[in-house]
Amino acid sequence: MRRKSAKNLAMSAVCVALLIAVQFVLGFVPGVELVTVILLAFCYAFGIFYGLLSATAFSLLRCLVFGFVPNVVVLYLVYYNLFALLFGFAGRRKISVYIGLVLPVIVGALCLYFAIQPPPVSILYQKNLQIMLWILFGLMCALAVFLCLLLFNGKLRKKENAKELATVTALAAFCTVCFTLLDDVISPLVLGYSAEATVAYFYTGFLTMLPQTICASVSVFLLFPVLKKLFFRAANRQEKLGEI
C-alpha cells in the first residue's frame, strides 16, 4: 500500500510539472492552454484525492515561475480544486449524457439573451461583447446538437466512449466559462476594485472567455481519449504494484 501511495505521489508530481511546463510554453499564445485537458484526464484516472493534491500543488508551485499574484493564487486554488472534485468524482462513475446536455443549453440560453438585449455598457465594449456572445452561443449550440445526436441516434447511442467524450467536452467548456466568471468575482474582491472598475474588469475578461472556451473544447475533444488511456494505464499499473 505504501509503495502504491508513493507511486501515485510520484505521478502527481509528474502531472504538476507537466502542467507548469505546458502553461509556461503556451503562456505566450493568448487563449491557448492545455492545463484543462491534462488535469481533467489525470483527475479522471487517479481520483479525487490525487486530483486535489495535484491541483493544489500546481496552484502554489506555479508561483515560482509566474510570480506570486494574490488574486490568481486564490482563483486557482478555488477553481482547480473544485475542478478536481468534479472530474475525480466523474472518473469513478458514469457521467449521464443528460448532464452534459443541460449545461451548454443553460450557457447558450444566457448568451442568446444578453446578445439580443445587451446590458448597458460602454459603446467600446458593447459591439465586441455582442460578437463574443453570439459566437459562444453558436459553440454551445454545436455541443448541444452533438449530444442530442448521441441521445437519439441508435448507432451512436450504443457507443459509450463517444457519449463519454461528448459529455466531458461539454463539462470542460462549462468549467472554462465558470473560470472566467469566478475570476470576475474573486479578483475585484482581492484587489479591492471599485464598482466601476469591477464592471470594466468583467467585460474585459469576458472577451477572453471565447478563445479559452473554444480551446478547452477542442483540446479535450482531441486529447482526452489519448491522455485518459495513458493515465488509466499508469493508475492500473500502480494498483497492480500495490498488490505485490
Image (cartoon, rainbow, N blue to C red):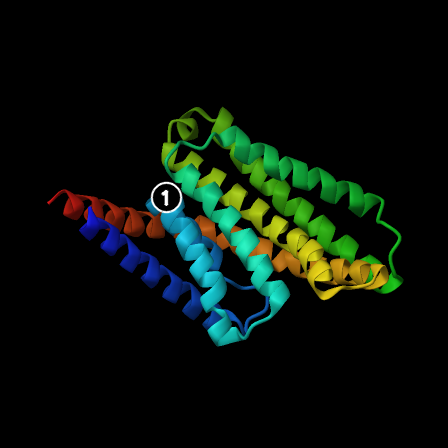
| Residue shown at 25% from the left, 51% from the top | 5
Mark 1 surroundings: few (<14), some (14-19) or many (≥20) residues within 10 A: many
The image shows residue 228, relative to residue 27, as above or below, that is above
Task: State which quadrant residue 137 falls in.
Answer: top right
Left or right of residue 145, residue 6 in this image? left
Image coordinates for residue 192, horizontal then vertical, percent: 76, 64
The image shows residue 134, relative to residue 195, as above or below, that is above
| Residue shown at 85% from the left, 44% from the top | 117
Image coordinates for residue 103, horizontal then vertical, percent: 60, 37
Q: In the displayed image of the protein, which residue is found farthest to the front? A: 2
* Of residues 16 and 164, the one drawn nearer to the viewer in this rendering: 16
Image coordinates for residue 51, horizontal then vertical, percent: 40, 50
* Of residues 190 and 241, the one drawn nearer to the viewer in this rendering: 190
On the image, numbered disc 1 is attached to which residue?
Answer: 47
| Residue shown at 82% from the left, 44% from the top | 116
* Of residues 6 and 12, the one drawn nearer to the viewer in this rendering: 6
Visible residue check, residue 73: yes
Q: Amino acid at mark 1?
A: Gly
Visible residue check, residue 41: no
The image shows residue 199, relative to residue 141, as above or below, that is below
Left or right of residue 85, residue 75 in this image? right
Task: State which quadrant residue 121 falls in.
Answer: bottom right
**Which element is circle 1 on?**
helix
The image shows residue 66, relative to residue 108, as above or below, that is below
Image coordinates for residue 234, horizontal then vertical, percent: 25, 51
Q: For the C terminus, give its image quadrant.
A: top left
| Residue shown at 56% from the left, 52% from the top | 79
* Of residues 66 and 122, the one drawn nearer to the viewer in this rendering: 66
Left or right of residue 106, residue 158 in this image? left
Q: In the displayed image of the protein, which residue is found farthest to the left? A: 244
